[in-house]
Each structure stands twice: as structure tokens, then as C-alpha cells.
Image (tube, coloured by chain):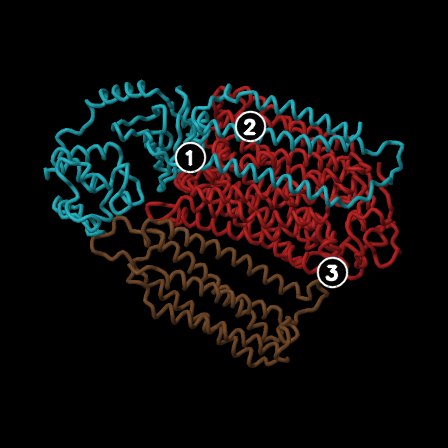
């Protein structure tokens, strides 16, 4: 069997002891990037479910005007923790810590990351960091100033409490997961720069690796900047240091600059890996190379660079100087260009393909569809005059969900469906997978599209209640949201079933042309028995398998997809 | 069904939808109540039409390719797609066209924005104080304060925003503009109302548990109606306004103690001592001589430097950095000076 | 070692794409993140300073006649402290060079001197903090920014001293030597970084504050 040929190799003496290691050592305290990647994904998914339930509770409250399902401060806590958990405890860890850890070393032909023990430390910081955020609920109330945590509302002690423990928990939590992220970024950057297989030059990198490269550079530079801001707010809350207190020389707008300097690049940290995943899936399921590989690579770099220059477009109504607003409008408009190039390239890849409309491709195309819409509303928001009306309304809520849910979450699911066989060694049920896709796509749109309209008509955001004129819209949105939430049960059932009863997965069920498919499903420790030597571009379908070029042809793997 | 046919269908859909967008007034649902609203709506419609085009192109071709190029059942499992890596000309076209479009859009936005931030030569000034969770509107010209409502005349208006506690945001959807009220950092917005009516002033920046309820009724009135309203308010207020027979020690000194002590009683910054009446006569470094001119509030440095409208002697309004004196306090200072600025 | 050769760290040599070791790249990435951290806090300081109507800000309610601030920072102490810290950077540099040349005794002597100078710097900082009477952390932002930035730097120096002690022990035990100098090199780079940050903070807090 192919797995045996590539199987446990003698290079890694430590692994000879594996039979005697406990389950905990092997599955929780392992330094193997694949185990760590899976752990990130499982932990991240748990937070996804919890944060999703918070949103459903909010939608229950918002289903009717005047509803008192949630007390106003509880609603605000749910809204804050929903956003914060989705961003810091799901999207970023799942994409970077999860997919990045699992796939990146495989795709570059490495045996593991540069610092495996540091990798484990990164992961071990994640669950406690997340739990601290939720601990606020036990101490009189979680943070309730929104995920953006603007002072003075965030430094104001909520009515009825002696201290804002919830906010302190929030700050500590984000600092801890930020440290975890930064360590991961260092690890990944060194890995990608230094541990690529022979022959894998920069322009032979798979596009997912390009995405990870730019993502971790962004992470490395901006996450510490956020840590600075968070510490400063913590100093004010704990010790009264008046950084944001105008009467003592502080400045309220300061926080917004420090926060958004991180948080805007953060949205690219969340979308670039998802775009990388989509760039991997579309060529495989079209059975042809990606269209415009270099353009996509350069666009990724351009987006990374521009990410640093646009942050104050979140502050157009804050009282920032007009000339500065014009500058940020211009840079924000510019960033639409590389994004558009990618979208057009993905669609063009489908041209003259031999498309297999399986779940991974459906989710990837769903991403293209919804992310494009989110990008379009982003351009609208980039125009300062239009933003003056749309900022702080449900139009913005719609935009952000189109790019973060329609973008990152669809991207995540397309990756899950694509690499499930590789990671678990089992296949998912294709019909259930397609059902999940259609439910998620349809009900995602019915939930979030109407939000554009109510926002334009005058519904502000972060409200537990609203003017009765928006009642019917909100009812429709809430009902859609419930169905959308329920659709995840399809996936969870499919996943559980696959792990127990699923068909065994071959090494390359989809006929991919990147290195992770040149090893067993799942790959053994050390990933590759012999170091692969790269001799061609990625996505090269003119080559018969084995892909890229392996030193000798003793390994014969199926050239075509064997799974229907 | 080929590429040309599909393109033709997309073009038809685009033309139909765009025509509908252009022709349908947005004003049905949300009337345009300011001049800015008109230009912003135009800009928005332009962007909407362009968005339809982009979306149709991307989604249209995506759907078409999915249907047209899918592997049919009778084709072999390992059938490949065409070995296309790119098309330089096409890639240049689809890079350049968006750039041109975005330049046009940015230029159009810039023009509208310049109008929005332009400071009008003459405008009716309203001071808005936002707090948790109400809107208080001061009319400095008439000395009227209203809470929970805001009346303004048709025409150029300047709103000066202050926040007492946390960040709030002044938003009237029919006006199409909003501006944050930031503690410690006064902000301004300028617009010209063009439509009489009753609107809702909404807080658009999360400010706590009362945020969803932080509304005020905003009335745009014709000049005549507004004048009538002002008269009515003044008559109603005159009985309660405590600005007759003011005493320095009872009415003015407390103001100094509350707002000026740190810099001008505990220390004497700029050489000004507000701890004693003599200090007012001695004055300080900014303007030499007394800071009060009996009977003439407009000529008194004290009135000039604390009031809502500049220019401010020395360049900064007092108290330095805010929070500034309330309308009632300013009214007291004005009245006391006009009553002779006596040391009583 | 020939004087003109390129300084390529001779760490555990795996075949890396760049020729530089993973450890070296790792420490450089780590220092980048540290620069970002200090950078954001320095931005914060500059922003607060620029945006405040008056700098240093006034302390509300202070008794009549009391000077608002500590009589301008005593020039001698911080300047001496700066010289001490920068000197420790020089000794550290030569300590590392000595290790690479295989002169373990010289390495140890210079390393010990570096550690002593580092501790002296911390002592100087502690002394200064103790004697800053009117610069409060929470009364106004002048104190807050000063203590936060110099405090964070001090924490980094402390961490650096601990790192150096670890390296000292390792060198004494023979763990770090000419053929295995990655950790020593990392400590040197970290120490230089801490010096560089101090130069910036010194310029921002001591040299450029208007004397009111």
C-alpha cells in the first residue's frame, strides 16, 4: 500500500517510542505540526459553535421590536463576545493555527515547522486564552463595549458593578491569544523562508503558502501593536493611568488608531488564508492550472503591503482631519484592485476546465460569490461621503458578514471539505456535503442581504432593539439565521459519521498536484520518507503523477481521482 | 449557449436593473433632507449601478462556466481541462479598467466630500451635548436649551458636537451624514437643510445599555415657523431663567470654583487669579487689563474666552480642553456682566 | 577568523534555503515583533503629546505654589545610565566575538562585565523612579507614558539580564562554545536591541521635553 512505502521512517528516532506514549502525550502534547493543527481546528470549532449560539440568542431578541428576551446589558455582552470570539478564537486560529500548521509544511515539502516545541506552546496558550474571555460571564458580566472596545465606554464600569472584570478578562484574553499568534508567526515565517524542499523557489510555491507567508508577516508586525494598545487600556482600567482620559492629558481617539492599526490588517489575516485555500481548490476541481498564478502571488503581496495603509477608514466619522480622511479613502480604493484581480483570475480558471462540482468546489465558488458582494459594499464604504451615512449601521454589519462569513467561513468550510480525507483518512458523504453547501449559501444570503437595506433605511448597529418599522425585516433575518445555524448540524453529523463509518481515503482522492497529496492520508510523522525535489510549477496537470518531481519513481500513486 | 450569448444576456440584465436603479427615487423611503443627501444619493446610485455590472460579470460567468464546463457523466474520470496559465492581455485589461473606474469614483467622492466639510460663511449654530442617553441641543443665539428634541431652521446649519461621557454619534438618516461626538474633542458638522419635516435623531455609536433608545425628535422648520417656536420658548423660559439680580459670590464664584480652580485658583497660570474679584480686575497675560467690562459682555475677555463662538483670546477656549461651561452658566456670566459685573 | 569574512553565524548547520540558521532568523523575527510593540507605544506617546492642549498636562487640583513637575529630570543620572547601558552593549559584542574565536576566558570576563553593567543600569533606573516625586502614573499622561515606556524597557532589560545569566551558566558548563554559538548570538542581538530602544526612549523622554 502506498502508505507503507512512505510510511514511518527511521529519520525520527523519537517516534519509535510512540507505541508507548499515552494518548494525551500523542494527541495533546505532541509537537507534530499535524496534531497541533488538528487541535487548533477542534478548539477553534468549539468556539465557533459557542459564538454562533450567542448570535442566535441575539437574533432571537431581535426577531421582534420591544423584545426583552435578553436584558440590554446581556445583549451587549453577547454582541461583544460573539464578535471577539469569532475573530480571535475561531477565524484566525482555525485558518492560521489550523490550516496553516497542517498544510504549510506539507506543501513546502518540510518534515515539520522550524520550532516544533514553540509550536506546541503556541497552541497551549489558545484554550486558556479563550476561556478567559468567557470567564467574564462569571464575574458579573463579560465585556460589553463591542469587539472594538472603544474608550470611554470600555473603561467605564458598567452600572451595578464595582469593577469591570469582564473587560479585564477580555483584554487579558486577547493579549494571550495575541502572544500565541505572534509566536506562530515567527515559527511559520522561518519555516517558509528556510525549510522549503530543494527546487521550491518562491514562484513555485503553492498559492496557499504565499497566502500564509504574507499573513504571518502581517501578524508579526501588527499583533504586537495591538498588544501595546491592549496593555495601555489595561493600565487605565487597573491603575487609572489616564491614557484615554481627556481631562488628564489623554486622548479618546488614540485608542481607535492603535486598535485599527492592528485590526485592519487583521481582516486580511483572516481573508488571505481563505483566499489561498480557494486558490488551491479551484485548479484541482477544474483539472487545470490556476489562471494567473503570478498575478495572484503579486496581488497577495500587494494586499499585504496596502493593509498597513488603510486603517482609518474605520474612523471616517470620528473627527479625523479631512485631509487624512481623503488619504485613507484613496488607499482603501487602491486595495480593491489586487482583490479584484484575484476574483477575476479564479473565475477565469474555470474557463475550459473539466469541472467536478463537488463540495469543496461549491464552497470555494460560494466564497467567490459572497466575497465579491462583500468587496463591492467595501468599495461603497471606502467613499467617505457614502460612509458618512452607512457607518455604524446595519449596512456595515452586512458588509462585514459578507466578507468574514461569506469570505473566511466559506473558505474554511471549503478547506475542511477539501482536506478532510487527507487529515482524517476518511471520506465525507458527498450528498450531505452538497446539502450543507446549499443550505449555508441560501440562508447566508437571506440572513445578511436584507441587513444592507435596513441599514440604509436607518437602523444603527449594536442595538438590542429598533424602531418598529424594521420589524418585518428583522423577523425575516432572524428566521433565516435560525435555519442557517441549524445547517451546521448537517456538517457535524456528516463529520461524526465519517469518522466512525466513513470510507477510507486514498492518498489523492481529488487528483491534486501539490505535495500534500504525494503522501498518505493521513501523512506519517516526518511527512515524507524522502525529501521531494521540485522540478515544476504547482498545478501542473501536464505531468503524470507523482507531482512536482520526486527523486525516484519507486513510489507509484494513482494519477487520477479514484473517488466518485 | 455560448460565451457571446451569455454576455448578451448579462448586458440585458444589467441595462434593465440599472435603469430601474436610476429611475427609482430612493427618496420614497428616506427623503433627502439636506443638500449633502442629494449628492450622496447620486454617488451611491452610481456605485450601485457599477456594482450590478461587476456582480453580474463575476457571478454570471461563474455560473455559466460551472454549467458549461462541468464534466459530463460520459467523460473519463481523469479528463483534464485546457492547459491555460494566463492571458497577459486579458489580465492587463481587467486590472486597468478597475483602476480607471476607481479613480473616477475617488474623484467624484472627493468632490462631494469637499462640499461636506466646507465651512459655510453663514450658518445657524446649534450646540449639541450628547450624554448617556440623551441629546441636549443648545441654541446659543437665543439662549434656549432643549432636551430630547432639536429644532432647526431651513437653511445652513452648523452643529457643534460635545460628548459628556462616552463617544456618541449624531445621525439623521434623511440627512445622510453623521459625526461622532467625542469627549474632550469638540467636532462640527455643516449641512444645509432643504426639506421641512420631523425626523429622528439617532445615536450611531455604541454608548452603553441605553444606546438603542437614544433618540431625539428633530424638527426642520421654515424660517417663519422657527422664529415662532423661538419666541414661544423664550416666553416659556423667561420666568424660570435665573438671570436677574445676580451676585458674584453666589452665582459666579461657584462657576470658577467648579471649572477653573486647577489652573487659576490653585495656581495662577497665565498670571490669572480667579480666586478673588481683584484678580478679575488685574487680569492675566493673554490680554492685559481687566477681564470684565461692566455692562458689556461682548467686550469682556471672560465672556469671549468661555463662550461658544470664537475667536478666543489666546487661541483656546476655556476651560482648556473642556468640558466647557453649560448654557445656563454662560447665561449667568453674560447677565452678571451686563448687570455691572459687581463684586456682590 | 579572518577579519574581512562575512559574518555568517556558525550555528548548527542544517541545509536551509537562505544559508542562515533557523535560530538566527527566529531571533530576528522575534526582535521585529518587539520593535512593533515598542513602536506602537512610542506612537502612543507621540500622539498623546501632540494632541494634548498643553504638554506636560496640568494636574487638576494640585495645591497652590507646588511645581507641577519634578524639577526637570536630573541630567546626570539618566545620562550616566545611558552610557552604562551602551557600554554593556560594547562589552557584549566583544564577548560574542571572543566566543567565536574560541577564547572562552575572555568571553566569560566580558559577559560578567556586561551583566554587571546591565544590573547597574537597572539600579540607576530604580533610583530615578524612587526620586520622581511629582510624576505620578495615574494623575496625568506625562507620568503614565513615562513609566509605561521606561518600565517596559526596564522589564526587557531584566529579562535580558536573566537571559545573559543563563548564557553565562551555559558557557561555564561548556554547552556554548565556538561550534555552538547560536544562543549566545541570540542573546547578543537581544541585548543590542534593548540598547537601541533605550537610545530612542532617552531621546524622546529626556532630550525633547520642553522645559516649562
Q: Is residue B157 visible?
A: yes
Q: Colour of chain C?
A: brown
Q: For this view, does B2 lie left or right of residue C173?
A: right
Q: Is label 1 on the same chain as label 2?
A: yes
Q: Residues within 10 Å of mark 3 (few under 14, many from 20)?
A: few
Compared to residue C182, the image places residue A463 above or below, namely above
Pointer 3 chain: A
Residue underneath mark 2: B45
Q: Nearest to the eye among marks 1 and 3: give it.
A: 1
Task: Report how far apart the C-alphas of labels 1 and 2 lie in the structure.
Answer: 22 Å
Subunit ID for the residue under disc 1: B
Position of C139 with respect to A55 (left or right) is left
Q: What residue sits 68% from the left and 69% below the top?
A: C12
Q: Position of residue A162 (x, y in %)?
A: 39, 40
Q: Secondary structure at mark 2?
A: helix
Q: Earlier in the sequence, mark 1 or mark 2?
A: 2
Q: Do discs 2 and 3 share a chain? A: no
Cα distance between the residues tagged 1 and 3: 62 Å
Q: Is residue C144 above or below residue A388?
A: below
Residue labelled with disc 1: B179
Q: Position of residue A563 (x, y in %)?
A: 84, 38
Chain B appears in which tint? cyan
- Chain letter matching colour red: A
* Quarter-of-image position of residue B7: top right
- Which residue has dot 3 on it? A14
**Mark 2 or 3, closer to the camera:** 2
Q: Residue A183, how many percent across, how many down?
A: 59, 55
Amino acid at each position: 500500500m502506498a502508505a507503507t512505502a512512505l510510511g514511518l521512517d527511521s529519520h525520527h528516532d523519537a517516534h519509535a517510542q510512540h507505541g508507548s506514549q499515552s494518548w494525551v502525550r500523542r494527541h495533546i502534547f505532541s509537537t507534530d505540526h499535524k496534531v497541533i493543527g488538528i487541535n487548533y481546528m477542534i478548539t477553534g470549532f468549539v468556539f465557533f459553535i459557542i459564538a454562533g449560539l450567542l448570535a442566535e440568542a441575539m437574533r432571537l431578541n431581535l426577531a421582534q421590536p420591544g423584545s426583552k428576551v435578553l436584558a440590554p446589558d446581556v445583549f451587549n455582552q453577547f454582541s461583544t463576545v460573539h464578535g471577539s470570539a469569532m475573530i480571535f478564537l475561531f477565524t484566525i486560529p482555525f485558518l492560521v493555527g489550523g490550516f496553516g500548521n497542517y498544510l504549510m509544511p506539507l506543501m513546502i515539502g518540510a518534515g515539520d515547522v522550524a520550532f516544533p516545541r514553540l509550536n506546541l506552546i503556541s497552541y497551549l496558550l489558545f484554550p486558556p486564552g479563550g476561556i478567559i474571555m468567557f470567564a467574564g460571564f462569571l464575574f458579573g458580566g463579560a465585556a460589553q463595549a463591542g469587539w472594538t472596545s472603544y474608550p470611554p465606554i470600555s473603561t467605564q464600569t458598567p452600572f451595578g458593578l464595582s469593577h469591570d472584570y469582564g473587560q479585564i478578562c477580555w483584554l487579558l484574553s486577547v493579549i494571550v491569544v495575541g502572544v500565541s499568534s505572534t509566536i506562530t508567526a515567527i515559527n511559520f515565517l522561518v519555516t517558509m523562508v528556510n525549510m522549503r524542499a530543494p527546487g521550491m523557489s518562491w514562484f513555485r510555491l503553492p498559492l496557499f503558502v504565499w497566502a500564509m507567508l504574507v499573513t504571518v508577516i502581517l501578524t508579526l508586525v501588527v499583533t504586537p501593536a495591538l498588544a501595546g494598545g491592549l496593555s495601555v487600556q489595561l493600565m487605565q482600567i487597573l491603575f487609572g493611568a489616564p491614557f484615554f482620559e481627556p481631562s488628564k492629558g489623554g486622548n479618546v481617539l488614540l485608542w481607535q488608531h492603535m486598535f485599527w492599526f492592528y485590526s485592519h490588517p487583521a481582516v486580511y489575516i483572516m481573508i488571505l488564508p481563505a483566499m489561498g485555500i480557494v486558490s488551491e481548490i479551484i485548479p484541482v476541481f477544474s483539472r487545470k492550472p490556476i489562471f494567473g498564478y503570478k498575478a495572484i502571488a503579486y496581488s497577495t503581496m500587494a494586499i499585504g503591503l496596502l493593509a498597513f495603509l488603510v486603517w482609518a477608514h474605520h474612523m471616517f466619522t470620528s473627527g479625523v482631519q479631512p485631509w487624512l480622511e481623503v488619504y485613507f479613502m484613496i488607499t482603501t480604493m487602491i486595495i480593491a484592485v489586487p482583490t479584484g484581480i484575484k476574483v477575476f483570475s479564479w473565475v477565469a480558471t474555470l474557463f475550459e476546465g473539466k469541472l467536478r462540482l463537488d463540495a469543496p468546489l461549491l464552497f470555494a465558488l460560494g466564497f467567490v460569490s459572497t466575497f465579491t458582494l462583500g468587496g463591492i459594499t467595501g468599495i461603497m464604504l471606502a467613499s467617505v461621503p457614502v460612509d458618512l451615512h452607512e457607518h455604524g449601521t446595519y449596512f456595515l454589519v452586512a458588509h462585514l458578514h459578507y466578507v468574514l462569513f461569506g469570505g473566511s467561513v466559506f473558505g474554511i468550510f471549503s478547506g475542511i471539505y477539501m482536506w478532510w480525507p487527507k487529515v482524517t483518512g476518511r471520506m465525507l458523504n458527498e450528498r450531505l456535503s452538497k446539502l450543507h453547501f446549499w443550505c449555508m449559501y441560501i440562508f447566508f444570503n437571506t440572513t445578511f442581504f436584507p441587513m444592507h437595506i435596513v441599514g440604509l433605511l436607518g437602523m444603527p448597529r449594536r442595538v438590542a432593539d429598533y424602531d418598529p418599522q424594521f420589524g418585518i425585516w428583522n423577523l425575516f433575518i432572524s428566521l433565516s439565521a435560525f435555519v442557517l445555524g441549524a445547517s451546521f448540524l448537517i456538517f457535524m453529523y456528516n463529520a461524526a459519521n465519517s469518522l466512525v463509518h466513513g470510507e477510507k481515503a486514498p492518498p489523492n482522492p481529488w487528483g491534486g498536484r501539490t505535495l500534500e497529496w504525494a503522501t498518505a492520508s493521513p501523512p506519517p510523522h516526518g511527512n515524507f520518507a524522502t525529501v521531494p525535489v521540485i522540478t515544476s510549477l504547482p498545478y501542473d496537470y501536464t505531468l503524470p503523477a507523482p507531482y512536482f518531481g520526486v527523486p525516484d519513481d519507486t513510489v507509484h500513486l494513482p494519477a487520477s481521482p479514484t473517488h466518485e | 449557449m455560448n460565451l457571446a450569448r451569455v454576455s448578451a444576456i448579462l448586458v440585458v440584465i444589467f441595462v434593465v436593473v440599472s435603469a430601474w436603479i436610476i429611475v427609482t427615487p430612493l427618496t420614497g423611503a428616506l427623503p433627502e433632507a439636506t443638500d449633502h443627501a442629494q449628492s450622496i444619493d447620486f454617488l451611491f446610485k452610481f456605485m450601485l449601478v457599477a456594482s450590478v455590472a461587476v456582480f453580474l460579470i463575476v457571478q454570471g460567468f461563474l455560473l455559466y462556466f460551472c454549467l458549461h464546463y462541468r464534466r459530463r457523466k460520459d467523460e473519463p474520470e481523469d479528463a483534464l481541462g485546457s492547459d491555460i496559465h494566463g492571458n497577459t492581455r486579458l489580465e492587463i485589461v481587467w486590472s486597468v479598467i478597475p483602476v480607471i473606474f476607481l479613480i473616477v469614483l475617488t474623484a467624484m467622492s472627493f468632490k462631494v466630500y469637499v462640499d461636506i466639510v466646507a465651512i459655510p460663511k453663514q450658518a445657524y449654530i446649534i450646540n449639541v451635548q450628547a450624554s448617556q442617553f440623551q441629546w441636549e441641543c443648545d441654541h446659543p443665539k437665543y439662549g434656549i436649551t432643549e432636551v430630547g428634541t432639536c429644532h432647526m431652521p431651513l437653511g445652513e446649519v452648523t452643529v457643534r458636537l460635545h460628548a459628556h461621557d462616552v463617544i456618541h454619534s449624531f445621525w439623521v438618516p434623511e440627512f445622510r451624514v453623521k459625526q461622532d461626538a467625542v469627549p474632550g474633542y469638540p467636532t462640527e458638522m455643516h449641512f444645509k437643510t432643504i426639506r421641512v419635516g420631523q425626523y429622528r435623531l439617532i445615536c450611531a455609536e455604541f454608548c452603553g445599555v441605553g444606546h438603542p433608545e437614544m433618540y431625539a425628535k428633530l424638527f426642520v422648520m421654515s424660517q417663519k415657523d422657527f422664529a415662532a417656536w423661538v419666541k414661544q420658548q423664550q416666553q416659556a423660559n423667561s420666568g424660570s431663567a435665573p438671570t436677574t439680580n445676580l451676585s458674584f459670590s453666589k452665582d459666579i464664584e461657584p462657576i470658577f470654583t467648579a471649572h477653573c480652580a486647577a489652573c487659576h485658583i490653585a495656581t495662577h497660570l497665565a498670571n490669572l487669579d480667579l480666586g478673588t474679584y481683584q484678580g478679575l480686575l488685574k487680569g492675566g497675560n493673554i490680554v492685559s487689563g481687566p477681564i470684565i467690562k461692566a455692562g458689556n459682555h461682548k467686550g469682556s475677555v471672560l465672556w469671549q474666552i468661555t463662550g461658544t463662538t470664537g475667536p478666543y483670546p489666546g487661541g483656546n477656549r476655556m476651560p482648556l480642553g473642556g468640558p466647557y461651561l453649560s448654557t445656563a452658566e454662560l447665561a449667568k456670566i453674560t447677565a452678571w456682566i451686563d448687570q455691572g459685573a459687581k463684586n456682590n | 577568523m579572518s577579519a574581512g569574512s562575512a559574518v555568517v553565524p556558525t550555528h548548527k548547520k542544517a541545509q536551509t534555503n537562505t544559508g542562515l540558521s533557523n535560530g538566527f532568523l527566529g531571533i530576528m523575527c522575534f526582535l521585529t515583533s518587539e520593535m512593533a510593540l515598542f513602536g506602537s507605544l512610542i506612537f502612543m506617546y507621540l500622539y498623546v503629546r501632540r494632541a494634548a492642549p498643553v504638554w506636560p498636562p496640568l494636574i487638576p487640583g494640585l495645591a497652590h505654589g507646588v511645581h507641577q513637575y519634578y524639577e526637570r529630570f536630573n541630567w546626570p543620572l539618566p545620562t550616566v545610565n545611558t552610557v552604562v547601558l551602551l557600554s554593556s552593549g560594547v562589552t557584549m559584542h566583544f564577548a560574542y566575538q571572543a566566543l567565536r574565536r574560541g577564547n572562552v576566558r575572555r568571553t566569560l570576563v566580558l559577559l560578567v562585565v556586561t551583566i554587571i553593567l546591565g544590573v547597574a543600569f537597572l539600579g540607576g533606573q530604580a533610583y530615578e523612579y524612587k526620586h520622581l516625586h511629582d510624576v505620578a502614573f495615574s494623575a496625568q499622561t506625562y507620568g503614565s507614558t513615562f513609566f509605561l515606556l521606561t518600565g517596559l524597557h526596564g522589564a526587557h532589560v531584566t529579562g535580558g539580564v536573566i537571559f545573559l545569566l543563563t548564557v553565562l551558566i551555559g558557557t561555564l558548563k561548556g554547552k556554548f562554545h565556538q561550534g555552538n554559538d547560536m544562543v549566545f548570538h541570540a542573546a547578543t542581538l537581544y541585548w543590542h536591541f534593548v540598547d537601541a530602544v533605550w537610545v530612542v526612549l532617552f531621546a524622546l523622554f529626556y532630550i525633547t521635553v520642553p522645559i516649562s
